[in-house]
Amino acid sequence: AGEIINTYEPGQLVRILRTYGEEKFATRIVESIVKQRAIAPMNSTAQLAALVKEAIPAATRRTGGNPAKRTFQALRIETNDELGAITRALPAALGLLNIGARLVVMSFQSLEDRIVKEIFAEASTSKSPRNLPVELPEYAAKFSLVFRSSETPTAQELESNPRSASVRLRAIERVAA
């Protein structure tokens, strides 16, 4: 993460913060990072957190918890290639399923869940031409969604584990070879 902060081009940093952190103030934060690293490389999380806090307008800082959480999330996702790993792993996992087997995925944030949702939707959609009166077997969907949408934690689960609030559970079943 330190390498990203200290060496990436400003445009790359803005893209990372906007895409992976959904950060509205990405440009302001990156401008502050670029000014700071011109003086000296950034080498601590406390330094970055303070810089982010200063870059975000005071009115916004008053709500939503630590203002640096989205920036740190974005850096973690970029550093670990988390979304790339999901994008590569899910199709491979689907390919390994036998008929009747299920794949269950827990997503912990919206970007992950969006990828899972799109891959599952693609896998469970027929590829038959739309205007045909019958389903062509070779184009039929090989997978079926176990439940239509995502499942979320119950009130009891949230009470015993408040950190489960962001979890989304999706499941898909192989129905054909």
Image (cartoon, helix red, strand yellow):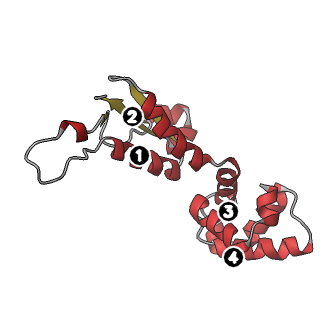
Label 4 and label 2: CA atoms lie apart by 39 Å
Please state the horizontal and vertical placement of residue 41, each as a whole percent of the image.
Answer: 89, 65
Whether the residues at callouts 1 and 2 have beta carbons within 8 Å, the answer is no
Residue depicted at 39% across the width and 38% down the height: 151
- Badge 4 vs badge 1, beta-carbon distance below 8 Å: no
When asked about the image quadrant of residue 140, the answer is top left
**Type of residue at label 2?**
Ala
Q: Closest to the observer: 24 or 16?
A: 16
Residue type, label 4: Arg
Viewer-proximal residue, 151 or 92? 92
Q: Secondary structure at mark 3?
A: loop
Cβ–Cβ below 8 Å for labels 4 and 2?
A: no
Say which element carries label 2: strand
Tell me how far mark 4 sits from mark 1, CA to CA. Answer: 34 Å
* Element type where label 1 sits in the image: helix
Q: Secondary structure at mark 4?
A: helix
Residue at image x 51%, y 53%? 111
Residue 97 screen position, x and y as percent: 41, 26
Per the image, the residue denoted by label 1 is 119
- Residue marked by disc 3: 67
Q: Residues within 10 Å of mark 3 (few under 14, many from 20)?
A: many
Q: CA distance from mark 3 to mark 4?
A: 13 Å
Marking on residue 18 = none
What amino acid type should be assigned to the residue bearing mark 3? Pro
Q: Does label 1 or label 2 sit earlier along the sequence? A: 1
Is 54 situated left or right of 164 in this image?
A: right
Mark nearest the camera among 1 and 2 is 1
Residue 28's disc number: 4
Q: Nearer the observer, disc 1 or disc 3?
A: 1
Q: Closer to the N terminus: mark 2 or mark 3?
A: 3
Q: How much space separates mark 2 and mark 3, taking CA atoms? A: 33 Å
